[in-house]
């Protein structure tokens, strides 16, 4: 009985929502606007890959090299190295890179993977400094 009630509410919402007048000049079934890329900290951790800085982090040191490689030290509280690594990997995979290799080292303090797009390879490495809330992201282009 509850399912039937919820289903009827959903159908009623779709009917009413579909009949609402359009505002903003966009056709009802036209393409959705392209969302702007999210840049969490106002800067990129790697300019070539356009990887944003980790949310709520404070950049301590950033070095960009001419070949696209970069090294960023940053501080963020309340996370672990796996969460930080997964954030950066999500950004890279969303940009079309596919994982080629994956490694965890040193009591789960270092996570790294090699990603490929076309013939280009890039290594992404995230390392936690001791037991602190300081992390290092290294991006190295291999090809």
Image: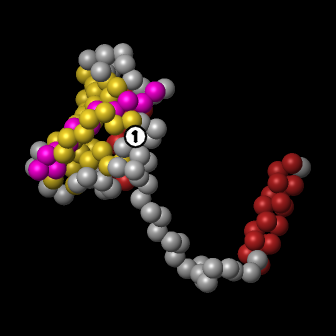
Q: Is residue 52 visible?
A: yes
Q: Secondary structure at mark 1?
A: loop
Q: Position of residue 122 (x, y in %)?
A: 19, 45
Residue 89, compared with residue 24, is above or below; it is: above
Q: Position of residue 74 (x, y in %)?
A: 34, 33
* Horizontal arrangement in the rendering, residue 89 relative to residue 14 (left or right): left
Report the coloring of the rendering: secondary structure
Q: Is residue 114 visible?
A: no
* Horizontal arrangement in the rendering, residue 55 relative to residue 20 (left or right): left
Q: Furthest residue to the right? A: 1
Q: Nearer the viewer, residue 104 or 33?
A: 33
> Which residue is rendered at x = 52% and y = 76% of the image?
31
Is residue 32 magenta-colored? no
Residue 45, compared with residue 9, is above or below; it is: above
Q: Nearer the viewer, residue 90 or 133?
A: 133
Is residue 75 magenta-colored? yes
* Horizontal arrangement in the rendering, residue 9 relative to residue 80 (left or right): right
Q: Mark 1 sits on what residue?
A: 54
Q: Position of residue 56 (x, y in %)?
A: 46, 38
Segment colored magenta? 65-77
> Which residue is rendered at x = 77% and y = 78% of the image?
19
Q: Quadrant of residue 107?
A: top left
């Amino acid at each position: 009985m509850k399912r039937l009630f919820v289903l009827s509410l959903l159908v009623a919402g779709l009917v009413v929502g579909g009949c609402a007048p359009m505002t903003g000049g966009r056709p009802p079934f036209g393409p959705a606007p392209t969302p702007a890329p999210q840049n969490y900290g106002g800067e990129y951790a790697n300019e070539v890959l356009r990887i944003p800085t980790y949310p709520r982090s404070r950049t301590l040191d950033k070095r960009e090299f001419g070949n696209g490689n970069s090294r960023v030290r940053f501080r963020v509280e309340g996370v672990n190295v796996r969460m930080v690594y997964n954030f950066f990997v999500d950004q890279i995979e969303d940009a079309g890179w596919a994982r080629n290799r994956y490694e965890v080292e040193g009591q789960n303090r270092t996570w790294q993977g090699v990603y490929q797009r076309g013939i280009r390879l890039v290594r992404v490495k995230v390392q936690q400094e001791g037991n602190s809330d300081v992390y290092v992201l290294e991006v190295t282009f291999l090809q």
